Amino acid sequence: MPRFSLSQPDPKTTVSDLQDLPETPSPKPEASPPAQPRASKEDQSLNEQLLEAKLRIHSQIIDELDLTVLGELSEDDLRTQIGVFVTRQIARERLPLGSQEVSAFADSIVHEMVGLGPLEPLLEDESISDILINGYNQVYVERGGELELSAARFRDNEHLRRIVNKIVSAVGRRVDEGSPLVDARLSDGSRVNAAIEPIAIDGPLVSIRKFSKKPLTLDKLVGFNALPREVADFLFGAVKCRVTAIISGGTGSGKTTLLNALSAAISHKERLITIEDAAELQLQQPHVARMETRPANLEGNGEIKQRELVKNALRMRPDRVILGEVRSDEAFDMLQAMNTGHEGSMATIHANNPREAITRLEQMVAMGGLRISQEAVRGQISAAIGLILQAQRLSDGSRRITHVTEVTGMEGDVIQMQDIFVFNRLDTADDGTVIGEFRATGLRPKCLEEMRRRGIHVPAETFDPTHPLLEVGAKP
Ligand SMILES: Nc1ncnc2c1ncn2[C@@H]1O[C@H](COP(=O)(O)OP(=O)(O)O)[C@@H](O)[C@H]1O
Ligand SMILES: [Mg+2]
């Protein structure tokens, strides 16, 4: 192991933007590989020496290389140029650095110049799905459903704020005290939310949901035990047969992932229109028209909401409308679409259980201020929706489809629903792992008949309640 490491997370050792240079530029630690254990006293003094050298080399870069020329280079060329310079200086100063450390140092400078600084290695790491920043010196990442503290650090909150502004200026927005909350998207599709002071008390709060290049398929979800194979097959058949499905769940419970996976069942002959606040869906069909809402500009004008897009979509002759998340008065237009020849449309909704999903839909319709009776709204909902799929992130971090519930109609003014499959939580292991089972309730969904007519046969065992379809966690 080398005696020195450039990977020590130290907030004071971060290179600032070269375009936006403070008085004393200081180099930054490389965020990955992970931090080395705390150095001994001797190592520490050597580390300080090294830090000095890094500071020196960094200012030399700024002094000796022509920044306007560098600004015109492609990222690869820039990397090469800086690499050459850093290597030469390191040799000149006889610094005891390994070749990997030299290239990590050069990379970190390039990241500051053309990228998002300490965030770059995290964005490149495909095993990371979320990046959550609580001020300059606390960066959490989510890997395989688990949160962990990463070694990435910013020099100070000002440095972090500058990176945030770099992100949001790319979409024509800005954050400052006047507008301290902002949503943006990175060029690769990752979604960013940032809150800065005074709303954020201890420095900028940044949440990044990375765009996964390979979205999870239904098979993969089955592989992760998110749902049993039998249930996945039933849902696939139902979506294929244009049963209208709503996916309900909390934030990060896997709604969008499930919607995306289920969309694979839709025929390639159909015309799909997707409507989202920030385009996330990655439908595999050739005929997809994608639309995205537009926030108001800096003067507060020009906002285009989901409701307008849903209305517009109906003039665009879709076979199905896929709404990323229904959250407001567009619910009414969505239900209408579902009831008027766009069966098989899908949406996600933020709710904790299927019954609540229905209540929330009612509330959203009411937000539109239309003068229709509650009974009429419920009639619309029960006629429009076939299945509600509940996604949940359990206390152990695992994501499961906990309910497959069918909306069967109205009795009086009450919407009738029946669970077809449920996840029963039975126990919790010592390490917190949730022990449970997926089981059919024994009720046969009404849509089965329509599925049969369309040539989709679901084996009778799928609905057999006498034994679990799948057990997870250790046996109690
Ligand atoms: N069953 C699953 N197992 C493991 N990871 C999952 C599963 N479903 C979703 N994920 C991951 O969880 C994160 C959140 O999923 P997402 O579908 O965006 O949630 P939501 O739309 O409910 O906010 C994503 O990184 C996704 O890849
Ligand atoms: Mg989502």
Image (tube, rainbow, N blue to C red):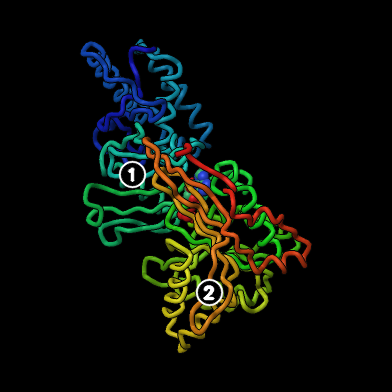
Q: Residue at x 68, y 74 (%)?
A: 317
In the picture of the structure, the residue carrying the numbered disc 2 is 416
Q: Quadrant of residue 86?
A: top left
In the picture of the structure, the residue carrying the numbered disc 1 is 133
Name, please, the residue furthest toward the front: 466
Query: Against 86, is 475 above or below?
Result: below
- The answer to whether the residue bearing label 2 lies less than 8 angstroms from the nearest atom of ligand 1 is no
User: Which percent across, then down, holds residue 427?
Assistant: 41, 44
Amino acid type assigned to the residue bearing label 2 in the image: Gln
User: Which percent across, then down, holds residue 459?
Assistant: 71, 55
Amino acid type assigned to the residue bearing label 1 in the image: Ile
Q: Any mark on residue 123, and which?
A: none
Q: Quadrant of the N terminus?
A: top left
Mark 2 and mark 1 lie on one chain; the one further toward the N terminus is 1
Under tag 2, what secondary structure? Answer: strand
Count up the numbered dots: 2
